[in-house]
Image (spheres, helix red, strand yellow):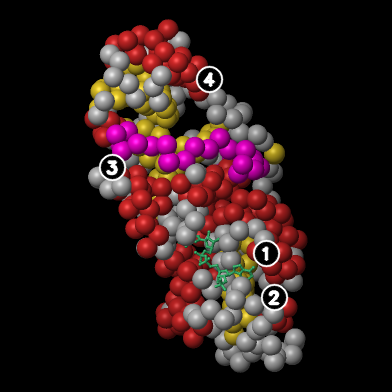
Amino acid sequence: MTSVVETLPVDAEPACRPGALRIGQLGLGNVGSALAGLTHRSAAALHDHGISLETCVALVRSVSRPRPAAAWVGTVTDDPDLFFAQRLDIVVEMIGGIDPAFALVRRALDRGIPVVTANKSLVAVHGEALSDLARHRNTAFRYEASCIAGVPFIGTFERRPLASRVDGLTAILNGTSNTILTAVANGDTFAAALAEAQRRGFAEPDPTADVSGRDAAEKLTLLIRRFGQRLVAPAQIPTAGITGIHPTDLRAARALGGTLKPVAHASWTSGTLEAFVSPAFLPATHPLAGLSGATNGILIDAPLGRQCYIGPGAGPNVTAATLLDDVYEVATEPHVRTPPAIASTVTTPQWARESGWFLRIATDAPAADISQLLATYGVWTSRIECVDGCVHALTFCATPRVLRAALDAVATATRADVAGYPVLSAEEPAC
Ligand SMILES: NC(=O)c1ccc[n+]([C@@H]2O[C@H](COP(=O)([O-])OP(=O)(O)OC[C@H]3O[C@@H](n4cnc5c(N)ncnc54)[C@H](OP(=O)(O)O)[C@@H]3O)[C@@H](O)[C@H]2O)c1
């Protein structure tokens, strides 16, 4: 293992400014580089707010990689022991994934060092365990940037426990999927839209997690824990990605008075947890229907009324700004620690809830025949359109099980490619 600090003894103190709060960065990639630069450029503004921050050390996978952001960091190393040999006031984790992020974050919290992270995978799987450890060590574990990075709503709700009593939520949580569907709706190809999202740095080089819905399922998991007090595993959430959407679906959705969006939904009013990640038809009047490109949003259904938070969901600069705000809060407001334990129960989410459905049946059979066959199985169409040689329809409420049986029957009778996506009404509950 090589390291630019390998000549330092293990308990060495780096040459950081006396009096400055010492940040250790786990990761100096897209987000880590943006954070190091922002911390450097924000020195005067932070000084006006009474604090001084200094990025003393960054842990990376390979020190041989050239990285301009190293100019803003005291020491770049690939050795975790040398990273933790520094005296650190705050650790910011931006490695991503579970391994080695989990062990490194645990190591910091175990020493009482507050941790701020942008890593939704880590928070989705180990969020409660890490929060427990932080409480045990009387320190902070904060993750505002891990979900809708540019919109600070998680901390807002943590500090408003009465407002946090919510019944459910509907959100657009993946900027890449939303960018692709927006661009395809405007006539782009799927591939060109994906390439543009990658060029702008908010789609991963491997976009599988984005387009399969897994990224949104991880974020939904942490939102269900935060707002629904239920522990679920991301893999348990019924999940459909955007890869099955055809350009003709987006044209048909518009003709039917709405749009298709990559939606994450959860509700728990009935006692059971209903949750899914899937493309969904939103009528044009839905508060999330107008969100385009990388914009994310969350609609929170609370007994006191609906609340909607909208803003940039990803991008290195946006994420870095939220991380730095978390660092600032941890540094300046000792009471902003880890929120009280959530009395969570382990739950298996279901997708059994009745809804209307947006259907595609790729057939030139008469629309009236399709409508009649669907009705035989208890699925009643409210509108039906033929777009580009495909039958598209909106239905009245049916359960996913009833819909599946009806679509299977249609597929058998017509040999057509069929698909169904839920309709979310502008005013919940719909059915
Ligand atoms: N990109 C965004 O817009 C965005 C938005 C919100 C949240 N996030 C989250 O932010 C985190 C970072 O994303 P990113 O886009 O910055 O990723 P990235 O560009 O791949 O950066 C990851 C960093 O972690 C380092 N690293 C990886 N494996 C390591 C290991 N085993 N030991 C030590 N260091 C290791 C890498 O080192 P090398 O540089 O040597 O490879 C790199 O510096 C992820 O959790 C992501 O989900 C990203």
* Place of residue 101 in the rendered image (x, y in percent of width and height, measured from the top left): 65, 64
Ligand 1 found in image quarter:
bottom right
Q: Is label 4 in a helix, a strand or a loop?
A: helix
Which numbered disc, 2 or 4, marks the residue that appears first in the sequence? 2
Q: Distance between the residues labelled 4 and 1?
A: 41 Å
Write down the residue under mark 2: 80
Q: Which mark is residue 100?
A: 1
Q: Which residue: 32% across, 21% down?
A: 363
Viewer-side residue, 239 vs 329: 239
Cβ atoms under marks 2 and 1 closer than 8 Å:
yes
Q: Distance between the residues labelled 3 and 4?
A: 29 Å
Viewer-side residue, 114 vs 194: 194
Residue type, numbered disc 2: Pro
Which numbered disc, 1 or 3, marks the residue that appears first in the sequence? 1
Which numbered disc, 3 or 4, marks the residue that appears first in the sequence? 3
> Taking the image as drawn, is residue 282 in sight?
no
Mark 1 CB near ligand 1 (8 Å cut): yes
* Place of residue 248 in the rendered image (x, y in percent of width and height, measured from the top left): 29, 34
Viewer-side residue, 148 vs 393: 393
Q: Residue 185 carries which label?
A: 3
Residue type, numbered disc 1: Pro
Q: Which mark is residue 401?
A: 4
Q: Residue 383 carries which label?
A: none
Task: Please identify the quadrant where the N terminus is shown.
Answer: bottom right
Q: Which residue: 60% across, 76% down?
A: 62
Q: Can residue 302 be found in the magenta stretch? A: no
